[in-house]
Image: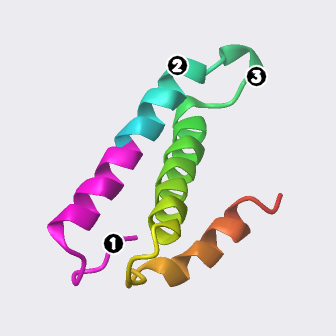
Amino acid sequence: IASSTCTAADVDDMVGDALYGLVVAGRTFDESYQVPFGAWATRQVKSAVYGGLRRWLKTGREKPIFVPLLGEERADYSD
């Protein structure tokens, strides 16, 4: 998601959001749904990163270069 023009702080924020998503995935995973952990974790990590991007945009700061990829999020969740 991050571009080579992102600042270190932007990338650090995204990494932090991704790690948060991984923790959420680990805490909420339920084997009884018969979904592989990797699939569950991928969805949770993506959700956390995109949520971080939405929060970042609400701060009113300059638009990050990677925002156009938010359209990918809609494709991922249009099951």
In the picture, which quadrant includes the N terminus?
bottom left
- Residue 45 as seen in the image, left or right of residue 8: right
Mark sitting earlier along the chain (2/3): 2
In the picture as drawn, the residue positioned furthest to the front comes out as 60
Gap in angstroms between the C-alphas marked 1 and 3: 32 Å
Q: Is residue 10 above or below residue 40?
A: below
CB atoms of marks 2 and 1 within 8 Å: no
- Residue 64 x, y percent position in the rendering: 38, 80
Residue indicated by mark 1: 2
Mark sitting earlier along the chain (1/3): 1
| Foreground residue among 39 and 25 | 25
- Residue 59 x, y percent position in the rendering: 45, 67
Gap in angstroms between the C-alphas marked 2 and 1: 26 Å
Q: Indicate the amino acid at tag 3.
A: Tyr
| Foreground residue among 13 and 76 | 13
Residue indicated by mark 3: 33
Residue indicated by mark 2: 27
Gap in angstroms between the C-alphas marked 2 and 3: 14 Å
Q: Residue at 57% of width from left, 50% of height from top?
A: 47
Q: Indicate the amino acid at tag 2.
A: Arg
Q: Main secondary structure of the magenta part?
A: helix
Find the magenta span and give its range. 1-18
